[in-house]
Amino acid sequence: MTSLPSHTDKKLGLVIDLDTCVGCHACVIACKGWNTENYGAPLADTDAYGAKPEGSFLNRVHSYEVQPETGAAQLVHFPKSCLHCDDAPCVTVCPTGASYKRVEDGIVLVNETDCIGCGLCAWACPYGAREMDPVEQVMKKCTLCVDRIYNENIPEVDRQPACVRTCPAGARHFGDLADPNSAVSQLVAERGGMDLMPEQGTKPVNKYLPPRPKDEVPEFDVLGPYLEPVAETGTGFVAWLDKTLSALPGGAK
Amino acid sequence: MPKDQPDLDLSPKVSDEIRKTTCYMCACRCGIDVHMKDGPDGKKQVAYIEGNRDHPVNQGVLCAKGSAGIMQHNSPARLRKPLRRTGPRGSGEFEEISWEEALQTATDWLKPIRETDPKKLAFFTGRDQSQSFTGLWAQSYGTPNYAAHGGFCSVNMAAAGIYTMGGAFWEFGQPDWDHTKLFMLFGVAEDHDSNPIKMGIGKIKARGAKMIGVNPIRTGYNAVADDWVGIRPGSDGLFILSLIHCLFKAGKLDLSYLAQFTNASVLVDEDPKSEDRGLFLRDADGQPQVIDRRTGHLAPWNGEGVEPDLAATYRHKGVTHRPVFHLMADKYLSDEYAPETVAPLCGLTPQRIHQIAAELARVAFEQEIRLDRPWTDFRGKRHEQMIGRPVSMHAMRGISAHSNGFQTCRALHVLQIILGTVEVPGGMRFKPPYPKPATAHPKPHSGVRPGEPLDGPHLGYPQGPADLCLDDAGDPVRIDKAFSWENPLSAHGMMHMVISNAHAGTPYKIDTLFMYMANMAWNSSMNTTGVTQMLTDTDANGDYVIPHIIYSDSYSSEMVAYADLILPDTTYLERHDCISLLDRPICEADAVADAIRWPVVEPDRDVRGFQSVLCELGARLDLPAFVNADGGQKYADYADYITHHIRRPGIGPLAGWRTGEKGLQHGRGEPNEAQIDQYIKNGGFWIEHVPEDCAYYKPFNTAYQDWAVKMGFYDVEQPYIFQLYVEPLRRFQAAAEGIGHRQPPEHLRERLKRVMDPLPIWYAPLEDGYADPTEFPLHALTQRPMAMYHSWGSQNAWLRQIHGVNPLFLPTKVWEANGFKPGDWAQVTSAHGAITVPVAHQASLNPDTVWTWNAIGKRKGAWALSKDAPEATKGFLLNHLIHELLPGGDDGLRYANSDPITGQAAWFDLRVKIEKTPPPDEVKPSLPSQTSPVGQGPKTLTWKIGK
């Protein structure tokens, strides 16, 4: 059993905007690319060109259909990775101490040299956010790009997770959710950011911004004033046109 | 830190070097930072790819395809060496040969036919990003048979845009993302401005601006749209014309903009006895006439200080001639376009159409933007402000890939123009070197002389029947029958008809089919099985009907197996390229820009960039553009061409860092030996910002026109007005009415009269006239996934884990009526054929539409995949259901399954029926396996370059 820190100075995490995510998978592959080349063992792929390709990914995008009581069905794209929970059950379940939550910033990591690949943490995680690497047989999970966000070898502007840097729609935001004045905390406050499955009691750090209401009937009357007819026929239209043009500045012929 | 928390290296070295080049994982052309690390052999290898922050297209972001480029670069499907076919065509059996043998073989085939009859070569180049180069090669060779893939892609959008307003979307123009308040998106192929659209949606969402999605399928961009209009496929034009109807009826039109900047005020000859009826009234200089409000008299449209009158008519010799605007009012006020009339055909409610029209009117006229930027128009009138109507639109393939697509795209452009939203703040903005009207483009050329170059560029914009590519008998000169009466304005050619016509020998037989980067034996052809039979068919002597096929590709695609000679291309990280202003550049509305690719790694195989191969082949064939005066090879390779080619005085493929009298300069200038190095130093691209006073109103803005000439986009200022009424269409219509010397064949007269309307119209997709809508009640579409580019993605170990299978998605109505359950299969039948495929349910879908992902299905043996790969056993193509010809009508003639105006392949006209079927072992049809010329990919990947 591994203990969680009683307190972390920061709570680094992601704010993911479900109103803006177009489901393009850019974050999925940027993550795969960075974390294959960097932290720990490469994210392997088995049967890569065969019948059942299976690779480890730290971030995946799911899509869910929503059928409102009235109106058209909707589709929500839902990117999912480790939520770096305050009460992370994946850490406390770890028999070797390989799973841990960093004191400095709250990032949950796996120390691969201590991981025995028992898979208990993946069972404990209610979000399914951990994946066993099919070759190395160590547990893989989102590192919040801990090897980018403090990295002095890359420009300051790039010191953010690969998924955030690459997101074309700007649907992913990174910051300190312990600081109420941070941009991410403000965004959560403005847009009603939500915990994923709060009933699990994991206190996730990552937040999701809900989709805005869709297909709303406009508040104005569609036929007036905007579509009030000025003419029904070509002749009537020309009469209206003459009158309107004459009324314009310099309109008198 | 607790004692069990390990000490991490938080600043690991990311790479040894960053090399900046241009992505080619789709057509979007983003800038990429390729991180290089020393591999085990000490050579630099690609370790990681991310977006280039300085690049105008993607500004640092990158899509899934772009980030997966490393897996494409290392794909097991890469070709390794030139190949000569040893087994029968289609088998995939080859032997490796040297480049010398390969080039000699190609020369032996191509030289004799150039000397006798150059049109025996058909050279078509697929998803080519070097068309100004390949076009030059084909022109120098002398064959009229050249084009790239635009004819089966989105030529309707491009041509409708050029004829109407001097450009369309994507590489021509984009919404003013920073100012727009209402964005309306019609169906797009995802790569037709991939990252910029996502970035733009992000911007407008962050501002709280509104987005309306018009698409039968609610996925991707449409999933995040605030309003979804789940329209019935093929009816977009009717919906748009109904919006125009509502706006005319309510007078919600930008009259000032229409009068000054469009031909709404130009007078039309309405003398029923005149041969010029329907054409513009012109003065002695040939300039279209308007009534000048200052005088009430006729004046040229572009006269100094002229104030064109939208309302006034001109009475002459007992005939009243009216301006275009009157004709539009007559047409669009008709109840034919009333929401109540069109709504059922569009699968919408009348209320929905009213609502959207009102929304457009509200934002355009109540939320006007005024920028304090004085500017002067081409009539010399000074405007104190730039006025914007912040409604913007974008559309591409969804509305264009129908047989009514050209007129639908025209309607969309006209809708934007009547709202006054084109080239204004908050609206749609052109990207340099556009705008450029149809009259500033070349006309098509097809003058063939043995042993000589063609008499001019192949492709262009006809202004009337005189510009068609016809022989003395009135028959098509081109093998694809582009620019013929059947498809007069086929500005991008008709690649999808080449194999079919060459096989049938209409209009003639060819000797050599030479193709580049187009998977015509699979997902890029209609009637895939039929096309593969045409490629393998033999004549009475046992010889192939198409005698020689040369193909160049980087990868082991399905088409490779059908060629006799393979010229293996490099990957995009191993090559030089230029994304040129002469072609389809990477400009943004605020900037002119072009870019290069360069070999960030050298190939580890015996492969060569296709363009470099053409430089050598051109010299071996003595093509004038590719040999020096002494007969020697003019360009050593493509990089040499990029640096030294001169297209017009001072204008070459790249506009940055040219040599001027006082040192380096941009735009015009002489070649600079170090130009490519300058591009590399600058991150792979060149950019210059559009001056602020040139930013909007570009076609009419004298400051922009002057700047455009200075930069070399064109050689003289060429202001113009938007063509709501397209006179060239009227010229074809008039010919069909019997006017003029060049007359269409009788069987096409009625069709031409109907479709070549100079004002946008709607007609039902042509397939509806053949495939009984009752028997085939469903529309069938494909979409290109955001994480996959046509057939390329399946060889990519990462991307195929996202899109490895493609069920046919069925709407709730169809799902329930047939009692489908998850895991079920269905037989899908069209008027042409049947397929058996897996199905899945999707509620967020037009109730009369089924769809699937494009080009996930693969043929066994192709792309270095195993034969039991899901792409080959469960993946499928709708192409089997679509014929390149429409079924025969009463006249017994079969027409191309294309837009009758432009020849655009009508992929999305497809109608089908669905029947539940017991699950088979695999999809049907299942074509025999091909032998893989590259073997099969490795079992396991653990990719890591660094330690």
Image: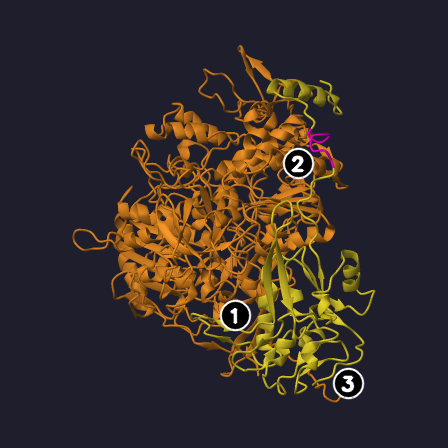
Q: Secondary structure at mark 1?
A: helix
Q: Are marks 2 and 1 in contact (CB under 8 Å)?
A: no
- The label shown at residue B355 is 2
Q: Secondary structure at mark 3?
A: loop
Q: Closer to us: mark 2 or mark 1?
A: 2
Res B504 → quadrant:
top left
- Going from the N terminus, do you reach mark 1 or mark 3 first? 3
Amino acid type at image mark 1: Ile
Q: Which residue is mark 1?
A: B70
What number of labels is visible?
3
Q: Residue at coordinates 65% horizontally, 52% vertically from top-left?
A: B201
Q: Position of residue B695 (x, y in %)?
A: 68, 45
**In 3D space, how far apart are the residues under numbered discs 2 and 1 (Cα atoms)?**
47 Å
Chain bearing tag 3 is: B
Q: Same chain for the residues at labels 1 and 3, yes or no?
A: yes
Q: Which chain is orange?
A: B
- The label shown at residue B1 is 3
Q: Are marks 1 and 3 in contact (CB under 8 Å)?
A: no
Residue B605 is covered by the magenta coloring:
no
- The label shown at residue A157 is none
Is B503 rendered above or below residue B345?
below
**In 3D space, how far apart are the residues under numbered discs 3 and 2 (Cα atoms)?**
61 Å
| Residue B120 in the figure: left or right of residue A59 | left
Determine the residue located farthest toward the bottom in the rendered image: B3
Q: Residue at coordinates 62% horizontally, 39% vertically from top-left?
A: B699
Q: Main SS type for the magenta part? A: loop
Amino acid type at image mark 2: Gln
